Image (cartoon, grey):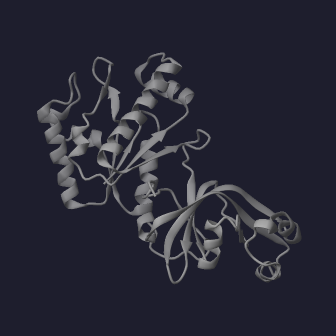
Amino acid sequence: MILVCGIQSTEKASFCEQMSKQIRASCYSIDEIINRKNNFILEINTYTEKKYRNLIESIKMIQHQQTNFILEVQLCQFNALMKFEKIPKKVFYDLNISSLVVIVDDIERLKEEIGGLYNMCLDYEFVEKMQETEIAYATEIAEKLNIGLQIKKCFNNKRIFLQDIVLPIKPKYSEKIFRGEKLYEYRKILCKKNIDKIYIYETSPIKKIVGEAYLLEKIRMEKQQLWDFTRTYSGITKEYFESYFRNHQMACAYKLGDITKYKNEVELEKFGVDFVPQSFIYTTFDPYPEL
């Protein structure tokens, strides 16, 4: 089970929808589970011993039917007295959670959205504290459960989450990337979407994702100009460069930033990908943020 949390109006549902399509998993909201039973209606002192036990049992029933699903939840929320209240940590300690994701957003936008929901004028500092409390509580839960924690943010406040790509690379070139000898990965075409990170899929014989690199820049230039600009950290010969871009006037490259080689290789299926991409494939979720 993947736990996705965040305060109100952070577009948790949008993220869960994207991720559920990618990893082919069902998505549930904890509010839906709570409201399925009359004795789960939110009220003052919401989470009594009986209620949190019933909540755990309801979630475990879902887990019994399907181990791979997404649970959307707001860890810290308003109660009937408009006081900030946390779902007890022990609710999550008894569940089999594989990873935790926190969705965050711009404070000014959240201030307007949440204020509108409650017909209140909220201070910037108050909403900022709400979001910081959610992150801190999620971090505490993740550390207790010894699971990975990711923080995802809307891109330019457009409710669009940055995607990453899986890029197939031959072993001899991936090793040069990890040694810092190759900081440019050449391609005839680049992905069109804004991306944050490149996952390095090492081709035969490994056939697994072996590491990752943050993207600094996508470059498209005339072929000779690109070679002159990148050759110091190209990791390839001029002859290979010319051969690869034969019959192309323009050439492209990804400029790599911070690079991490995983201690353990990761199967493509863990990223919701069930085939080897010829060029690249988009992914929105990193199942192993701690690697």
Whether residue 11 is visible? no
| Residue at 20% over, 23% down | 45
Q: Is residue 141 left or right of residue 59?
A: right
| Residue at 41% over, 38% down | 6
Point out residue 160 in the picture as x, y percentages from the top left corner. 56, 47
Q: Residue furthest front?
A: 179
Point out residue 106 in the picture as x, y percentages from the top left corner. 55, 33
Whether residue 258 is visible? yes
Vertical side of 117 occupied by 96: above or below = below
Among the 4 quarters of the image, the one containing residue 69: bottom left
Vertical side of 207 occupied by 177: above or below = above
Q: Is residue 273 left or right of residue 78?
A: right
User: From the image, which quarter does the N terminus lie in?
Assistant: bottom left
Q: Considering depth in this image, is 232 or 217 the residue closer to the camera?
A: 232
Query: What number of labels is visible?
Result: 0
Point out residue 117 in the picture as x, y percentages from the top left corner. 42, 25
Q: Considering depth in this image, is 149 or 14 the residue closer to the camera?
A: 149
| Residue at 43% over, 27% down | 130
Point out residue 192 in the picture as x, y percentages from the top left corner. 67, 60
